[in-house]
Image (tube, rainbow, N blue to C red):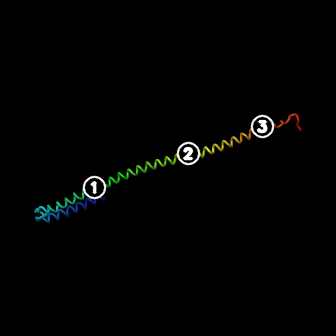
């Protein structure tokens, strides 16, 4: 829709310039400072309009190139930030894995100690039962 409106405005302005130029067909003098030229006013108007178009196009091309450069730089910064973020995430994951592994190892060591303590208790009880006189099955009651 924007392109259609822009095209309509461009055509309307072009028609206005052409009508204005056709209405002004008399000769006019142009003084360039070092030379003076007599040309039909229509050529002067069309030449000035064309010169305006060329200047506008050159400025527009320069702005487009600057914007393309800015986009390229922004893309590089985004890529660098993505890489930095990826490195940071990997480091955080590694640190969390190490922390969890250390916690798990500590819990396992604690359970191993508990198992050893229970084994010592069991051995002690077994030894105590071995030292106690066994009940004589013949002496009942």
Which label number is shown at residue 127? 3
Q: Is residue 37 left or right of residue 128?
A: left
SS for callout 3: helix
| Residue 38 position in % (x across, y down) | 10, 63
Between 7 and 138, the one nearer to me in the picture: 138
Residue at the outermost top position: 138
Real-space CA distance between mark 3 and mark 2, rounded to the nearest whole angstrom: 43 Å
- Closer to the N terminus: mark 1 or mark 3? 1
| Residue 29 position in % (x across, y down) | 11, 64
Q: Quadrant of the N terminus?
A: bottom left
Report the residue marked by disc 2: 98
> How many marks on residues?
3
Which label number is shown at residue 62? 1
| Residue 11 position in % (x across, y down) | 22, 60
Which label number is shown at residue 99? none
Q: Classify residue 20 by image quadrant.
A: bottom left
What residue lies at 34% left-to-right and 54% top-to-bottom? 70
- 104 relative to 31, above or below: above
Q: Classify residue 118 by image quadrant.
A: top right
- 84 relative to 22, above or below: above
Q: Is residue 104 left or right of residue 81?
A: right
Real-space CA distance between mark 2 and mark 1, rounded to the nearest whole angstrom: 54 Å
State if disc 1 and disc 2 touch (CB < 8 Å): no
- Closer to the N terminus: mark 2 or mark 1? 1
What residue lies at 46% left-to-right and 50% top-to-bottom? 85
SS for callout 1: helix
What residue lies at 31% left-to-right and 55% top-to-bottom? 66
Real-space CA distance between mark 1 and mark 3, rounded to the nearest whole angstrom: 96 Å
- Closer to the N terminus: mark 3 or mark 2? 2
């Amino acid at each position: 829709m924007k392109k259609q409106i822009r095209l309509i405005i461009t055509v309307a302005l072009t028609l206005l310039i052409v009508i204005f130029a056709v209405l002004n067909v008399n000769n006019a003098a142009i003084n360039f400072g070092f030379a003076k030229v007599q040309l039909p006013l229509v050529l002067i108007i069309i030449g000035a309009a064309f010169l305006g178009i060329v200047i506008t196009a050159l400025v527009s091309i320069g702005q487009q190139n600057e914007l393309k450069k800015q986009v390229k730089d922004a893309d590089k910064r985004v890529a660098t930030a993505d890489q930095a973020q990826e490195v940071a995430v990997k480091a955080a994951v590694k640190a969390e894995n190490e922390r969890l592994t250390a916690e798990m190892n500590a819990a396992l060591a604690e359970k191993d100690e508990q198992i050893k303590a229970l084994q010592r208790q069991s051995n002690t009880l077994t030894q105590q039962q071995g030292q106690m006189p066994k009940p004589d099955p013949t002496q009942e009651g």
